[in-house]
Image (tube, grey):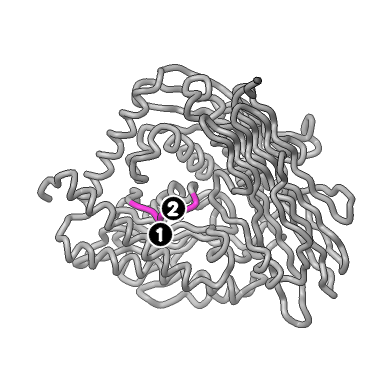
Amino acid sequence: MTALDPVTTEILWTRLVSVVDEAAVTFVRASFSTLVREANDYAVVLTDRSGRNLAQSSLSIPSFIATVPQTIRTFIREHGIDTMVEGDVFITNDPWFGTGHLNDATIAAPIFHKGSVIGFAGVVSHLPDIGGRLRNPANRELFEEGLQIPPMRLMAAGLEDSTLVRLIRQNVREPDETIGDIWAMVSCVQSLGRRLVSLLDETKIDLDGFADDIIQRTETAMRAAISEAPDGSWSYEIENDGPDDMPGGVVRVRASVTIAGDQVDVDFDGSSDQVSLAINTVMNYTYAYSAYALKALFAPWIPNNEGAFRPIRISAPEGSILNPRRPAPCGARGMIGHLLPPAIFGALSQALPDRVQAAPGSPSNNIQIVSLRGDVRYAVNAFLGAGQGGGAGQDGVSAVSFPSNLSNTPVEVMEGQAPIEVLNRNILRGSGGAGRYAGGDGIGFSFRFRGQSPANASFMINRVRCAAPGLLGGSAGRAARFEINGKPMPASGQHVLHEGDVVTIETGGGGGFGKEETT
């Protein structure tokens, strides 16, 4: 390929991103569940033929931009490119090959141009249900958490594996929504493939050469940004709610960050061992949120592709909470994995205090309620944000999901999906930690259950025991609260709701940043 000038490269790059964004719109419009349409819990990624990340949809969940390429490389390794034909579509929800828990399915399809595989279209999304027990920290092993789909063909040469589809339908509570979302994902990757081929035919660019060019440019820019930071090693430890049988009922994430020239290493040695709760974070997910934090800190302005992650190395001891052994439960892995950015920010606050922010009030809050309304089964799966930590130069944002980029599920959607009456949802003013820049405020939320049949319910409410710490002299945010009928309840475990029960949730406030100025 003839060398491209920077202007042409930028034009082609933005068109490549547009192709991926158009495929993402296809997925959202075709999807069945509110997890896609309302919560934004998905990502679409384009890779080259070796599985290198080239571009991802603009509204992607940050972690998925690093996990999807690893899953595609698994498909390549397990099946081999030479065996792939047009119309093949692959699927898995294996946590160790995918996003870290069974609830996310990753689907990918090879993209053919002039008879050869030139790349892969990938999409990952949180499915409405995957069977097993409701997603909850109290699950004790992977086998409780639902159906495991190994890396396999969902479609072979355009023909669906009807046995696999039937098996999935048989094992989930919401078969129409779940299979509907899966076929929407298939439409997404097929659409992405067609759009890419059209772009290549129009522009005549060689995708391999273009991929090498943009990845190299991005890597060079990332290394230059890292080189501007001081060399050294720094450590930081952050705590979060853990099992009752651990000292203080907390787990610890310890991050040691080393900058050496244009390379940055993060070592999580010293973090808690893996636990018998579903808050373990597999290495794919550990890498993804660590890499995201470093990319955001050093060079947020450069494109997101494989080049941004080449100067980064992440390690965690095998058997630790950040690199557990099978069959460790991991369905609620976001409750710990979302602490990795604040742990890294805490370590680098000593070297780059003008770029970091304090910990968020609650990395992951989720509500699931399932039962029958007459003869019809319903399931609501909703998210609640919390306070973002205060940062250098700005207060934390209230009622957001940081770092996951999830959206708060609208009240109307929850009431439409399940027999609940929302009593209030409001911002908890003053729940963010004080500081030169205050932490964002959490959310107050309560509802009355109106179902005639009892419902199984799971509430993933984080930071009940461990409030979000402040940074560089800032104060901690307010801890979270979870009650049923005015009685504090354990956030880990399933609950049975009866008609008239009132559930009250307060999500945590973000930590404050810097010492509060006095007048």
Q: Nearer the viewer, residue 198 or 142?
A: 198
Q: Main secondary structure of the magenta part?
A: loop
* Residue bearing the label numbered 1: 122
* Residue bearing the label numbered 2: 68
Other-residue count near label 1 (Cα within 10 Å), few / some / many at <14 / 14–19 / ≥20 = many
Which residues, given as a range, are shown in magenta?
Answer: 55-61
Rendered image quadrant of residue 264: top left
Q: Quadrant of the C terminus?
A: top right
- Is 433 situated left or right of 230 in this image? right
Q: How far from the left and from the top, in percent, is residue 83?
A: 32, 63
Instruction: Tell me if residue 84 can be seen.
Output: yes
Residue found at x 64% / y 28%: 435
CA distance separating discs 2 and 1: 7 Å
Q: Are marks 2 and 1 in contact (CB under 8 Å)?
A: yes
| Residue 37 belongs to magenta span | no
Residue found at x 35% / y 21%: 261
Rendered image quadrant of residue 300: top left
- Is 64 situated left or right of 385 in this image? left
Q: How far from the left and from the top, in percent, is residue 395?
A: 58, 36
Residue found at x 42% / y 66%: 25
Q: Tell me the number on the disc at residue 231.
A: none
Chain-order first, disc 2 or disc 1: 2
**What kind of element bears circle 2?**
helix
What's the residue type where badge 2 is placed?
Val
